[in-house]
Amino acid sequence: MKRTVYVNGSFVREDLANISIFDRGFLFADSIYEVTGVIDSKLVDNNKHLNRLRDSLKFMNIDLTMTNKEIESIQKELIEKNDLDNGVVYLQISRGSEDRDFLYSENIEPTVVMFTQRKNFFKDPKALKGITVITHKDNRWKYKDIKTTSLLASVLAKNEAKRKGADDSWYTKDGFVTEGAASNAFIVNKEKVIKTHPLSSDILPGTTRSTVFEIAKLLDLTVKEEPFSVDEAIDSEEAFITGAGTLVVPVIKINQSVIGDGQPGEITNAIREKYLSIALS
C-alpha cells in the first residue's frame, strides 16, 4: 500500500509527491531535519525534537511560520493515515525554492516535507544481538550540533563500515570518540559508570541521549559527560548507541575487539527495556 506523505500543506500519495528541482535542500543541502520515534502509535520525545528543530532553524536563519503545535498535528495525522504503530516520522524543512544562487532571498518560502517509516523496535535483531563498529576520523564540518541534511560524510562512513564487515562507524577526534555516524556513543566502564561525550559543536545534542540520562537516574546509574578514548572504549564492559530511529542498541565489537563478553550488556539492556516501557505507558 502506498504511503501518504505531507508536502507543503498537502497530504498526497507518496508516488504523486514532488518538490521543485530548484529547492535549496536539493541543490545545497540548505535544510534541516528531525526524526521522531513512534511507539504504539504515539510520538516519542517529540517536544525535545521540535525544540531542537527551532534551534536548527534559528542557526540556519530559516523563517518558519508553522508552529510546533501545527507540526505535531500533521505528524499525528500521518501516523493515523498510514496506520503506523511502530516506526518514525521524518520531517525536513529546506529554505525553499528559487533559481540556483549561493545568496538566498529574504522572503523565500520554506519547503516542508514529512513522511513515515515502519520499524519494529521490539524485535530489532541489532538491538537483541548487538552491533559492531569501526572508528573513523571525523571529517565533517564544524557545526555537528546543528541537524542539517548535509550528511555525505556519514553516508560514506556508514558504507565504509559495511565494506569492512561492520554495522556502523564511530567518529573520532584526537583519539577520542565523539559520536556515531548517526547516533550518540556511550560506554560503561568497569566501575559501572556510563560515559558519553559532553555537549559541544562536536556532537549532536541527541534527544534519545537526554532521555537516557533521565532513565539512568531512575535506575540509580551514574552518567558522566566526559570524553573517552578509543582504547578506553575497547576496554569497557559495555558500549551502546542511541538515536530516535534505533532507541538504544548494544555495541559488542569495536575495531574487531570484543567488548566485555561479546554480548549485549546488562546495563544497556536495562536502559533499553525501561525506555520501551516508558514509551508504552
Image (tube, helix red, strand yellow):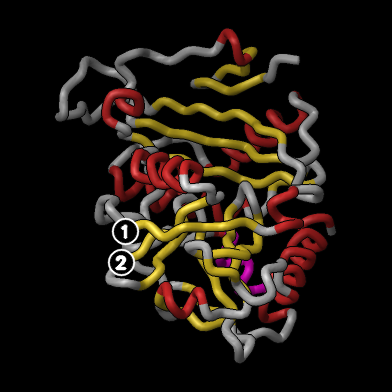
Q: What residue type is labelled 1?
A: Lys
Q: Where does the image place residue 129, in percent across and percent down from the top left? A: 73, 57
Q: Which amino acid does label 2 sit on?
A: Lys
Quarter where residue 79 is shown: top right
Q: What stretch is highlighted in magenta?
A: 208-215
Q: Where does the image place residue 277, in percent across and percent down from the top left? A: 82, 62
Dot 1 falls on a residue whose secondary structure is strand
Say which residue appears at 34% left-offset and 13% top-offset: 21
Front in this rendered view, residue 13 or 225: 225
Q: Does the magenta stretch include residue 253?
A: no
Q: In the rendered structure, are the residues bearing label 1 and label 2 in contact, judged by CB atoms less than 8 Å apart?
A: yes
Q: Does the magenta stretch include residue 214?
A: yes
For residue 137, the mark is: 1
Q: Where does the image place residue 154, in percent across and percent down from the top left? A: 40, 45
Q: Where does the image place residue 221, in percent across and percent down from the top left? A: 67, 84
Tell me the chief SS of the magenta region: helix
Say which residue appears at 40% left-offset and 36% top-offset: 64
Say which residue appears at 46% left-offset and 58% top-offset: 134
User: Which residue bears the numbered disc 2?
Assistant: 173
Front in this rendered view, residue 253 or 118: 253
Q: Is residue 29 left or right of residue 82?
A: left
Quarter where residue 12 is shown: top right
Dot 2 falls on a residue whose secondary structure is strand
Q: Is residue 146 left or right of residue 77?
A: left
* Quadrant where the image shows the N terminus: top right
Q: How crowded is mark 1: few (under 14 residues within 10 Å), some or many (20 or more)?
A: some
When the figure is inspected, residue 7 is found, relative to residue 166, above or below; the finding is above
